[in-house]
Image (cartoon, rainbow, N blue to C red):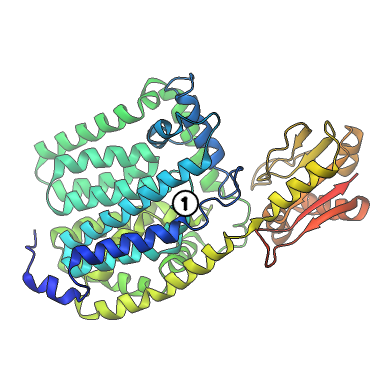
Amino acid sequence: MRRLRRSDFAESRWGGPWLALAALLVGATGLRLVGVRYGLPFPLLNPDERNIVPRAWAMTHGSGADPGWFDYPTLVMYVLAPFQSWHDEPSYLTARVVMVALGAAGIAAAWWLGWKAYGMLAGFVAAAATAVATTHVAYSRMAVTDVPLTLGATVALALLVVGRIELAGIAVGLAASAKYPGLILLAPLVAAAWGRWRRLAIAGALALVAFAATSPYVILRFGDAAGDAARVQRSARDGWLGFENDNAAPIAFVERLWDSLGPVLVVAAIGLVLALVHRTRADLVLAVFCLAYFAQLMTIDAHFDRYVLPLIPALGALAGRLRSVAPVTILLLAVPLTWSVRDTRDLTKTDTRIAAHRWIVEHVPKGARIAVDPSTPDLTGYRIVHLLLPRPGEPFDPNRDVDRLRGEGVRFLVLTGAVEDRVLAARTHYPRETDFVQEARREGDRVYRVLPNGRFGGHWVEVFRL
């Protein structure tokens, strides 16, 4: 392990490293808190919030610790559950605030990882990169699993760098209990403990114990959990709406990393090459993790930006490895910071789907039958026909037919660009879904339309009377 030198403090020039870290955490937390109320009381920031937060709330309101759903392990739900206990209904705001706190912890963990790997200046670079990376900023205010996974992965890597193999095993188990891809951390664990078989065995056992303790029903209901996890993995491999025209997975995920880090990604790539050449313990841990994690991304055709999130702190540390260009690297972080501020500014507006929801409540009689796109607010008091999300390889939703909807007594149809813009952009993949949008506009009576503008954020929403 590299020993801290007095020069590390002198070179920081920010009034001392801990003051710099504190200032970074305050600024990063403030950035993440802006927009944390977006779309409330509905989970419009990310549809996965609807899968996680209500189950966490139910755990403290009589349903017990078994979520009965295993698309993800249960650690994140267990973490959120105590903070839901005093609410009469699921609180997305409380859950998002918890995620902001975990995001801040992830920045501190990135500092620790960079510091222990390559020195205090590298720690600042890693933390600053994590603090401003667009993906980390965005997902730190969403009550989903990706930021907890990233926190667990960063802690595990830092423990491996300092040689705490057994404790790293626990962190690996917790990361996997946040989201299944945390299992990839077994690769750097094996690499760091290679030849020390007893310690490796203990670390592996502790990883299993940590996972089982925090996601017990994944073990107790292994058949159901394995089926859910396999279905999620198949969906990721098959692709998702919106990625039909993407480049091949390696290029697409490099693009996602560029969208997160900007030109700092180039510095990180140089740091990765140097790590492969010099192969210190820190080099080995970070390089094996980055390569193993990126290798599994190459099997995925659903190129979600959140999938690259666990790589951000490690790449930040590798960028910090180049001490001679650290000032330039820090200046380059102004690029993703600008992008994050731009994205955050949009979250200060009212979502167009909220505006459409208000119009419907005011103008459509209760009890009316309404067909709605996915990712729209709940319409209490109405009879809802939920249109399915078009996806590669999935059968056509028969409800995407105006005549059929009319025959079933549906009188209103709600479409949103959050879904339909992606359909129209890939119309050769979804010809019947495209025809449905055009049919609705041709035969339906559009009674309301709202567009994103200076007041509203999000995507267009149109309401038709059929």
Q: Is residue 238 above or below residue 382?
A: below
Q: What is the secondary structure assignment of the residue under circle 1? A: loop
Rendering coords of residue 127 (x, y %): 29, 62
Rendering coords of residue 138 (x, y %): 48, 57
**377 vs 402, nearest the viewer:** 377
Rendering coords of residue 356 (x, y %): 75, 50
Are there few (<14), some (14-19), or many (20+) residues within 10 Å of tag 1? many
Q: Residue drawn at (24%, 70%), measured in percent from left and top?
A: 320
Relative placement, left or right, of 438 versus 456 is: right
The C terminus lies in quadrant: top right
Q: Residue drawn at (40%, 31%), measured in percent from left and top?
A: 82
Relative placement, left or right, of 296 versus 289 is: right
Relative placement, left or right, of 179 versus 347 is: left
Residue type at numbered disc 1: Arg
The N terminus lies in quadrant: bottom left
User: In this view of the protein, can residue 297 be seen by the observer?
Assistant: yes
**427 vs 16, nearest the viewer:** 16
Tally of numbered tags = 1
Residue underneath mark 1: 141
Rendering coords of residue 245 (x, y %): 62, 62
Relative placement, left or right, of 93 versus 161 is: right
Q: Is residue 26 above or below residue 206?
A: below
User: In this view of the protein, can residue 272 be seen by the observer?
Assistant: no
